[in-house]
Amino acid sequence: MLDKENFYTQMSDSELIQSIKGGNEEPFDILFERYRALAIKMTNGYYLKSFEAEDFLQEARMIFLKAIHTYDSEKGHTFGNFYKLNLKHHMFSLVRKDMAKKRTIEKLAESYDNLLEMREGMQHPRHGNVETPTLELLQVREKLADYQATLSEFEQKVFLDYIHNVDVEDIAENLNCDLSQIKNALDRCKRKMKQLFD
């Protein structure tokens, strides 16, 4: 294993890129380490609520892999500049999604309000008014909105897959990350939910 790592370390960026494009994922970490400082510098310039350093780094790794598979040296860009541009666009996208998430929470709250008003006004054909635990539903609505706001984008992806009965191994494969990162994200999701609903 050490000999193989030494072998990859001696390869140029372009050689490693071609190797990864050809289906060999082993040198990915070695290539990413060469650009880790760039990734950290780029992500440090942004703030997203509930985003932790690990989440930013995971996003940077995901974009790095995409950049590898879409990079074309014949277009005149260096891989470093190409990755930097892709990561910058992705960070802008995350910011837009964060803002959209806030608007979604507001719309979700409005939808719950409309649902409550509709249910309170309904008449059952045999039993009269439908009794609605208004205060309880309002409290759940507020907590659900609060909970969504506490999750990073990476945690949301993991949590949504998890509640749809996707195995943690498959989640890790879908998001191209280690199983331990998925388990850690789920632990954070469960901890945040417990803090809100206890």
Image (cartoon, grey):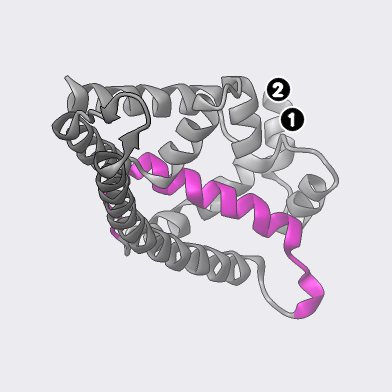
Which residue is labeled 2 in the image?
Answer: 1
Judge whether residue 59 is colored magenta.
yes
Extreme residue in the left direction: 135
Residue 31 shown left or right of residue 154 in the figure: right
Of the 4 image quadrants, the one containing the C terminus is top left
Instruction: Give the amino acid at mark 2.
Output: Met
Q: 187 or 9: nearer the eye? A: 187
Span colored in magenta: 47-75
Of the 4 image quadrants, the one containing the N terminus is top right
Quadrant for residue 14, please give it. Answer: bottom right
Q: 1 or 89: nearer the eye? A: 89
Q: Residue at x 66, y 59 (%)?
A: 67
Judge whether residue 56 is colored magenta.
yes
Query: Vertical placement of 89 versus 129: above or below?
Result: below
- Marks 2/1 in contact by CB < 8 Å: the verdict is yes
Element at label 2:
loop
